[in-house]
Image (cartoon, grey):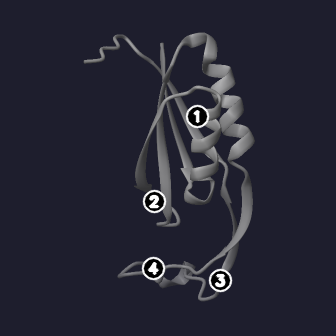
Amino acid sequence: MKLILAIVQDQDSNKLSQALTNHNFRSTKLASTGGFLKAGNTTFVIGTEDIRVNKALQVIKENCQSREQMVAPVSPMGGNADSYIPYPVEVEVGGATVFVLPVDQFIQF
């Protein structure tokens, strides 16, 4: 058994949730916040059998696309202002960051 942690952008959350349900994966959604852009993310916790991991990864990949987005920089608070860029910049956001972990024991009450 494996535990899949998938961190996705909020924009992809509902689409991924529906796709996981359609492919008979049970998941738990957790609200999370990214450290780089300080933007909302959704973390999916998915438990599945080893033989279904590749299918789960395929579903995640198909429903979480990266995209370009303009973001306003956060002004430095007491830091070095030399690297501060005072205008919006375009960055790549989205996609998914996925961790696949072994599960030693699964208990359901």
Can you identify the residue that label 4 sits on?
80
The mark lying in front, picked from 4 and 2, is 2
Q: Which residue lies furthest to the left in this view?
A: 109
The mark lying in front, picked from 2 and 1, is 1
Mark 3 burial class by Cα count in 10 Å: few <14, some 14-19, many 20+: few
Q: Which of these two is toward me, 98 or 78? A: 98
Q: Is mark 1 on a helix, strand or loop?
A: helix
User: What percent of the width, then of the height, locates residue 33?
Assistant: 43, 58
Can you identify the residue that label 1 sits on?
21
The reply to whether the C-beta atoms of the residues labelled 2 and 3 are less than 8 Å apart is no
Mark 2 burial class by Cα count in 10 Å: few <14, some 14-19, many 20+: few
Sequence-first tag of 1 and 4: 1
Looking at the rendered structure, which numbered label has been put on residue 88?
Answer: 3
Mark 4 vs mark 2, CA separation in Å: 19 Å
Can you identify the residue that label 2 sits on?
35
User: What percent of the width, then of the height, locates residue 109?
Assistant: 25, 18
Mark 2 vs mark 3, CA separation in Å: 18 Å
Relative placement, left or right, of 28 versus 108 is: right
Q: Which amino acid does label 1 sit on?
A: Thr
